Image: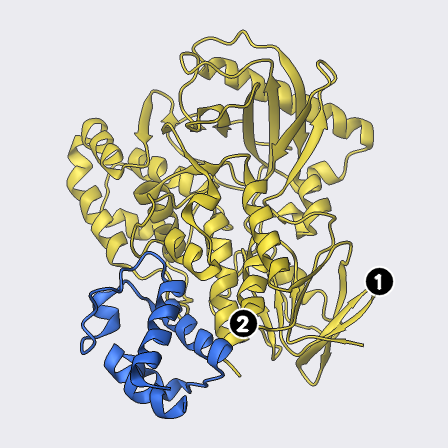
Chain colours: A yellow, B blue
Amino acid sequence: MSRYDALIIGAGMSGLACGIRLAMFDKKVCILESHTIAGGLNSYYQRRSRVNKEIIKFDVGLHALTNFVKKGTKRAPLTKLLKQLRFQYNDLKLQEQSHSLIKFDNTQLKFTNDFEVLKLEVSEKFPSEIDGFIKLVNAVNEFNELDLSNSEYTSSRDVLKNFINDELLVEMLLCPLLIYGSAWEHDMDFSQFVIMFKSLYFEGFSRPEGGVRTIINLLETKFKELGGELKYRHGVQEILTKDDKVVGLRTKKGDFFSDVIFSSAGLPETMSLIEENKAKYEVGKMTFMESIAVLDRPIDPKDFDATIMFYNNGPKYHYEGAKDFFDPRSAVICVPDNYQGNNDPYGVVRITYMANYEKFNALSKEEYNQTKDLAFDKAMELVKSQFNNFDYNIILKDTFTPTTIKHYTQHFRGTVYGSPQKIKNGKTPYEGLYIIGTDQGFLGIVGSILSGISLGNLYGLMQE
Amino acid sequence: MTQEEVKNIVLDIIVDVAPDEDVTDLNPAESLRDQLDLDSMDFLDIVMELRKRHKVEVPSEDYPKLATLDSCVEYLTPIMQ
């Protein structure tokens, strides 16, 4: 019988970070992961190009590591994370974005890792709104988004109305924040808005050299060096409870026992693993599909110089579960070539659409492939319309859909930002069972890692 | 263990927990958190490292006794004999 001080469901960012904290202080801890590699919602894979036989590495999940700060920046989330996990800043090998664009028809706002650029853009494009924008910035600055006791939902749109009158500016500011983190349709909780505002606009985007696998490898190596156990192909089938307390986890390969369990599987997904569970938790509606085109040579900045473009057709941003397979009215175009210092020998464009899980899930294999091709072609049309010039050859194409996400992460409906219900303090109706990761409510890669750290500290180290 | 040794133990831990901080000119009578960029997470690590390296248990009600370098030494020296 295997007994542990703590068990963790899922070797994603939050599970690994939580595991590192516990193992660092000599806890006997085991992470159970259903997949064959780590990363969870931010993972990776590779494919061989049929054109030139080259092996090409892909990232799934976020296009960027948010929360970029320069080395040594005090009190920043990234700095906290590095200290808590005992990493060096240079371990992450961060490459900064060139700039990003929010583009609604003919109006665009540029932002970079220097917040002054966005302020200047707002003052130029929306001169009558700059005072309100600065007041909003002050309100964001004063808000303590990391307060774990703060669990009431406040509509960000309601708060924004107090500061900004121009509806187009509201939509444009919300667009990147929603699509990079909101589990709610059309809106998000104000505390999550603040997290996102700070991490995208105040701080900014970067990417580790080599992509997301650089971070995953760091986390995994550290966890194992500290003596943590990590078991792949160990999907949890049941959370074992007795008198409303957790006692262990059941997998096909055997039972694991502990009275402290951290689950990064998602809130409704975690609760569905408890046989007697009667509580109902809402499954989110936001899921996505992404087309990835690998090009025969790196993208020339003269053709396209933004790292990420948040594109929208029309003045209103429709952030909602797609009615059809995907919603072509808006998209995120990510060009990793434009991370400074990236020297991949080929070019990459990633185009993300909001999508519909049920529609994809109902298709036959053949229809599914046809729909993927259709979405890919639509995505390339958009790319060509946004590039100044596009004469690249596509050497490899790939598309993942909500059903792909469901398959690899077991998230119901392929949700990426989890349930609209967030459990800030991680507590569940079951003693010893804690939610970490997306459904705890910190967002992005840095947020997930901080979620694992914070709750690991609180329930794994401080309560003895 | 002498007071000087206990002081060095605490400083060693701070350097490991917060490697970017300069501890050479600390005023021992002044609050550590006022002089260094230490948040509650770092503070937890100091307590955890004391336990891990020196088997010293600091109950949470005693955390205020670790506020300055002087008070750390005063509190920890008798425990670490």
Left or right placement of residue A174 versus residue A132 in this view: right
Do we see residue A155 in this rendering?
Answer: no
Q: Amino acid at mark 1?
A: Lys
- Position of residue B54 in the picture relative to residue A369 (left or right): left
Which one is earlier in the sequence, the residue at label 2 or at label 1?
Answer: 2
- Neighbor class of circle 2 (other Cα within 10 Å; few <14, some 14-19, many 20+) is some
Image coordinates of residue A115 in percent, x first then y, are 26, 39
**Residue A25's mark?**
2
Label 1: few (<14), some (14–19) or many (≥20) C-alpha neighbours in 10 Å: few
Disc 2 and disc 1 on one polypeptide chain: yes
Q: Tell which residue pokes out farthest to the right in this image.
A: A253
**Residue shown at the point (34%, 20%) measured from the top left:** A106
Quadrant in the rendering for residue A254: bottom right
Closer-to-camera residue (A12/A87): A87
Against A48, residue B81 (above or below) is below
What residue does disc 1 label? A252
Whether residue A145 is situated above or below residue A218 in the rendered picture: below
Classify A101 as above or below A434: above
The quadrant in which residue A301 appears is top left
